[in-house]
Image (cartoon, rainbow, N blue to C red):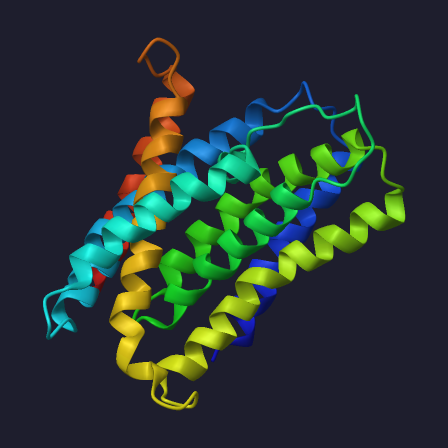
Amino acid sequence: MSFFFIILLAGCALLGGLAVFFVKNGNNQNLKLILSFSGAYLFAITILHLLPDVYANDQNHKVGLFILGGFILQILLEQFSQGIEHGHIHSHSHHQSFPWGIMLSLCFHAFLEGMPLTVKNNQELVYGIAIHHIPAAFALGSVLLGNQLKKNSVIIYLIVFAAMSPLGYIFSYRLSNGNIQSLGNYYPYIMGVVIGIFLHISTTILFEASVDHKFSVKKTIAVLIGIALALGGYFLEG
């Protein structure tokens, strides 16, 4: 278990959320570029690292069903999170009720994202998830402020969100080492669900990053950099 991973995941999510107190919601072009980069990076890492690993460990040849299930699960989660995983920012200032659906689904999503981090050679994936959480946490903070929560309450909820991926990582670490009874036998299938979620998130980010199916020059460069970094790690491992 790497404490550096835990600190990086929690730190990026928390900093991204706290930035909502200093950055105007309309000035989020840089966050969109980060989102495009992380989407391309996550997609490439999933294809180059996670999929080969999980199929290599799938003795019963059923992992494809769980990948499909994870893809569908993310579709269902977004009915409650309203796409905050993609960095979408929605105004809810017309009411003051706490957005429980958004908070709970986003935390569950972040917890699942932390689970693949026990895979061998997972540094690239850690960086991708950490960067991906910056705009997601920023969007969450914006929604919480839009619901007129006090600043201290917003910070507390952001801390809870920031802790979810590290908790998923810790849980998965214990799971993969067989420390939670016999659940370790189902680890490839849990990984399949997470891969399905990653495929949905990353492809949605890439499609939504374009206007009229056209990428701007800056977003194209961000996507290419994300893919290039993933490929660089892949070839260095080889």
Which one is nearer the viewer's eye here, 104 or 221? 104
Q: Quadrant of the C terminus?
A: bottom left
| Residue that sits furthest to the top in the current view | 212
Point 25% across, 70% down: residue: 188
Residue 182, how many percent across, how many down?
A: 34, 88
| Picture layout, residue 116 above or below residue 65 | below
Q: Is residue 18 visible?
A: yes
Position of residue 121 measured from the top left corner of the image (x, y, whole percent): 30, 69
Identify which residue is drawn at 64% across, 57% down. Answer: 162
Q: Nearer the viewer, residue 133 or 55?
A: 55
Q: Residue at x 46, y 52 (%)?
A: 129
The image quadrant that residue 173 belongs to is bottom left
User: Looking at the picture, does residue 106 appear above or below residue 90?
Assistant: below
Q: Quadrant of residue 189?
A: bottom left
Left or right relative to 233: residue 217: right
Q: Relative to the observer, which residue lies in front, 65 or 34?
A: 65
Q: Is residue 188 left or right of residue 96?
A: left
Residue at 51% x, 33% y: name it.
83
Residue 16 image offset from top left, x and y in percent: 65, 44
Whether 183 is drawn above or below 63: the answer is below
x%, y% of residue 3? 56, 75
Taking depth in this image into account, of 233 and 120 the one nearest to the observer is 120
Figure disc tally? 0
Mark yes or no: residue 232 visible: no
Q: Is 27 above or below relative to 151?
A: above
Please tell me in which quadrant of the rendered image residue 185 appears. bottom left
